Image: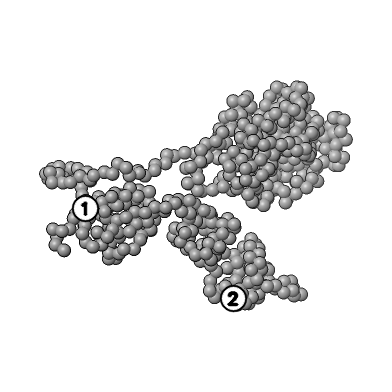
Amino acid sequence: MSSMDVKTVEVSVKGKKIMDFLLKEGKSAQKYVVGEVAKGLGEDLEKLIPILSDLSDKGLLKLFSEETERVELTSEGLLYAKDGLPEWNLLKILRDRKKRIEEIRETLGKNGAKIGLTWCMRNKWVKSEKTDKGALFSITAEGLEVLDKGLLEQKLLEKIAQNLVYLSDLNPEEIGVIGKLLDRNLLKKKIERKYSLSLSKALLEGKIEPILVVTALNRDLILSGAWKKARLKRYNLSARPPTTYIARKQPYLAFLDELKVKLVSLGFQEMIGPLVEPEFWNFDALYQPQDHPARTWSATYSIKKPAKGKLPPGGVVERVKSAHEDGCGTGSIGWRYKWSPEVAAKLMLRAQGTSLSARTLLKAKPPSKYFAIARCYRPDVVDATHLSEFNQVEGIVVDEDLTFRDLLGILKMFAVEIAKAEDVKFIPDYYPFTEPSVQLSAKHPEMGWVEFGGAGIFRPEVTAPPKVEVPVLAWGLGVDRLYMVKAGIHDIRNLFNEDLGWMRRSKVLI
């Protein structure tokens, strides 16, 4: 074919760069995944699509698109892709000899040993035998076979860490394993548009050839006079431009700010206080006895150094002591034990926002109402509805003639106006510092009934020490769960993830 028969096609600087990249290994009719092309060029995928669309319009290639699902690693999955799944690491250390649980924990850590043994025992890769010195763990024939051929779960995690993995590209066995990794929260699905391309038949047959075209006039072109012969690029006005994201606050934090503004506009004053509290404010001032199970190490985080803080000055400590021992003149007989200031002085991480209400009662004068959005800490097992650190929206209303009906009205306002819940229910409950007490629950579209928190009217043993002589309505709600219901989120951990896509797509809700 003579040069006269070859049609030249104008391409931009980036268009020429793309064509050179596709042709560097020789002309091929194969399909290219655009994501891999973008990675190879070091370019942003979204910025590449309009250029490829232009090249397609010029007959140099064909661009295909389809909506597809891909998977990416969570933070835990990323850790296992790098350091190995616990069960994989367990099989490797058991290859040479049997080991006791202490040896396994020493190598894998307590949590790694627990997870590794759970999966290996479930799959019959490891067995245990009783000895005089405790259980001895060894690898089975099935476990050795897995070691020899490699653990598919581990291979997939490492593969996903290195490349984009689309579900449509996986075989049935891999799809099954992906499902297990999703259930373990090691992976998350992401729906996106997948682009692929192939070089055109005309290009492969040498009938057309891409040539570089000037995309803008610059100083050198004008001074040299070359602009007179230059051809300016023709722009495809139908091509989609890249999406630009402006800076914004994380959606959940924006929700908390808007919630604070709403409560202030309703006349509430904000309560503030330290994250590290003496047990006095977190428990004793709230008439919670010193032998209550909620005050043990399994329910709270205690401070190792310094272990104790200072109790407040004045007579409030003596009056709280009296409330615990004999009821402080309220008509109650108290808890009838010897109250210890040493226990009350122990330092802890704030376990409930109600500690702020206890502090505020010392200065509260009716009529008044207060709120706090407080960070709290409890050693809960982390799951879809629990975190070891969480936010509570806490509040009290101090006034004469307040009733339990007024409290239910406030709680319903939170569930309906703030969380936009359609179904709300109140359940009788018990708390050491309120009577009567109630639990607020709202219906989540996927998770069913979700407990928001508790509320009630402060007992006289709580209000007598700070010398409050009128009713005090009190509530403490899990604001994290309020937002979950409002935003339709089914896993509380997702409120604090690093998924930029979710943050960009989410609307500020209040």
Under circle 2, the secondary element is helix
Q: Nearer the viewer, residue 159 or 26?
A: 26
Q: Which mark is residue 142?
A: none
User: Observer-nearest residue: 151 or 460?
Assistant: 151
Q: What colour scheme was applied to this rendering of the protein?
A: one colour
Answer left or right for 214 relative to 401: left
Q: Quadrant of residue 393?
A: top right
* Position of the N terminus by quadrant: bottom left
Q: Percent from the top left, x then y, of residue 239?
A: 33, 44
217 vs 197, left or right, is: left
The C terminus is located in which quarter? top right
**Mark 2 crowd level (few <14, some 14–19, many ≥20, 10 Å Cα):** some
Residue found at x 72% / y 51%:
298
Q: Which residue shows up at 53% across the image and 62% down it?
A: 175
Tell me which amino acid carries mark 2.
Answer: Leu
Occupied quadrant, residue 369: top right
Counting from the top left corner in percent of width and height, residue 427 is at 75, 38
Residue 39 horizontal/vertical position (percent): 37, 57
Callout 1: helix, strand or loop? strand
- 449 and 278: which is toward the camera: 449
Q: Mark 2 sits on what residue? A: 144
> Which tag, 1 or 2, sits closer to the chain's start?
1
Q: Residue at x 57, y 68 (%)?
A: 88
Task: Please give the label number shown on residue 9.
Answer: 1
Res. 390 visible in picture: yes
- Give the residue drawn at x 64%, y 33%: 416
